[in-house]
Amino acid sequence: MKNDEQARFLFGISLSDRPKWQQFLLCSSGFFFGYLVNGVCEEYVYNRLQFSYGWYFTFVQGFVYLFLIYLQGFTTKQMVNPWKTYVKLSAVLMGSHGLTKGSLAFLNYPAQLMFKSTKVLPVMVMGAFIPGLRRKYPPHEYVSALLLVVGLILFTLADAQTSPNFSVIGVLMVSGALVMDSFLGNLQEAIFTMNPETTQMEMLFCSTVVGLPFLIPPMLLTGELFKAWSSCWQHPYVYGVLVFEAMATFVGQVSVLSLIALFGAATTAMITTARKAVTLLLSYLIFTKPLTEEHGTGLLLIGMGITLKLLPENKPHQRVSTSSSKTKTSKPAPIENERIRLENAGENEENSRLV
């Protein structure tokens, strides 16, 4: 586990003094809850109400985040990083949120899900290039991620009634979101790694404060600010849905940051990908949709990917460190032998003088 020296908390629950599996279970549960509610709310707002204002909704969500962070008791006096640390992170974060939400205006949910499910692969690749991280993964983790991605895509395509609906603009938007996602998790992990005293609340607060101004130019250039304001003014209950969604997503965001701090960006990306599979599976179970052979194949690949990820890693380099420590302790031996030789030579010289 990374950053063992830093005490980690999740909404007042201590994570540092718990075993690794409990940390994983608590953080994953908070993430699953937050983003399951987020998915339901997005489905309602975008598909039922036909409100496709991704930049504006992200803007509103940011202010809800700030209010909830204030209720958690966080202040700027608790910051351990300078503001400039969060400029690049905030631009990537807001861009990812805005493009992801906005793409639903041009893509249906299965099409967006197909693209977003591949996020774990660019996250793993980009981790090798982020300064302060330079993370490399063993081959079996790439295979695990590939199985997970292919399985989820097969599961998504198996639903013939909701086949993917592609649009050039939507594809460009969700592709841009994927590029930003590949930077996002790795930048967050790099900040946690370089300064373990960084808390989840600080990162979410600073990235939100710095990131909100980045949303204004696209809202003005596209005219979305005035259209969204007019539509929401006519249907004010939409704000209630947005606030409820933001509260649930806040729980998910803090849980995700906890996962990144404890387990790394790539593992977190795999968990978020697996969440999409669980969401789809639950929809089939709840609404009693028929499961086909394609669904079964997709689930099998997902299960294989998760199982491969959970396999323990062999770490032979620990024996090397032990041997090197032995080598270090044996270095003073020649010095000691030289000292004894000089003492014996001195004794012999003194004896010769006496004679």
Image: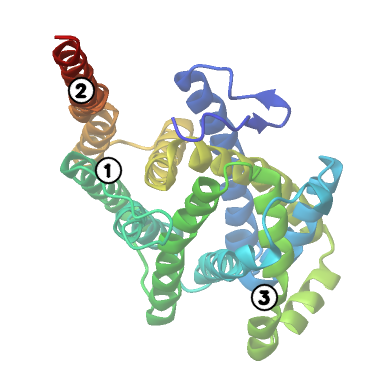
Q: Which of marks 3 and 1 is nearer the N terminus?
A: 1
Question: Seen in the image, is 124 located left or right of residue 350?
Answer: right
- Label 2: which secondary element: helix
Q: How far apart are marks 3 and 2 (CA)?
A: 77 Å
Q: Position of residue 235 (x, y in %)?
A: 81, 66
- What residue type is disc 1 on? Leu
Q: In this view, does 38 lie above or below 336?
A: below
Q: Where is residue 322 in the image (x, y as percent from the top left)?
A: 24, 22
Residue occupied by mark 2: 342
Residue occupied by mark 1: 148
Q: In this view, does 349 lie above or below 220?
A: above
- Label 3: which secondary element: helix
Residue 127 shows which numbered tag?
A: none
Question: Seen in the image, is 293 located left or right of residue 287?
Answer: left
- What residue type is disc 2 on? Leu
Q: Position of residue 294 (x, y in %)?
A: 20, 42
- What residue type is disc 3 on? Leu
Q: From this viewpoint, is residue 41 visible?
A: yes
- Whether label 3 touches label 1, CB < 8 Å: no
- Label 1: which secondary element: helix
Question: Seen in the image, is 234 located left or right of residue 267?
Answer: right
- Whether label 1 touches label 2, CB < 8 Å: no
Q: Earlier in the sequence, mark 1 or mark 2?
A: 1
Q: Where is residue 10 in the image (x, y as percent from the top left)?
A: 66, 31
Q: Which of marks 3 and 2 is nearer the N terminus?
A: 3
Q: In this view, does 72 lie above or below 27?
A: below
- Whether label 3 touches label 2, CB < 8 Å: no
Residue 215 shows which numbered tag?
A: 3
Disc 2: CA contacts within 10 A as few (<14), some (14-19) or many (>=20): few
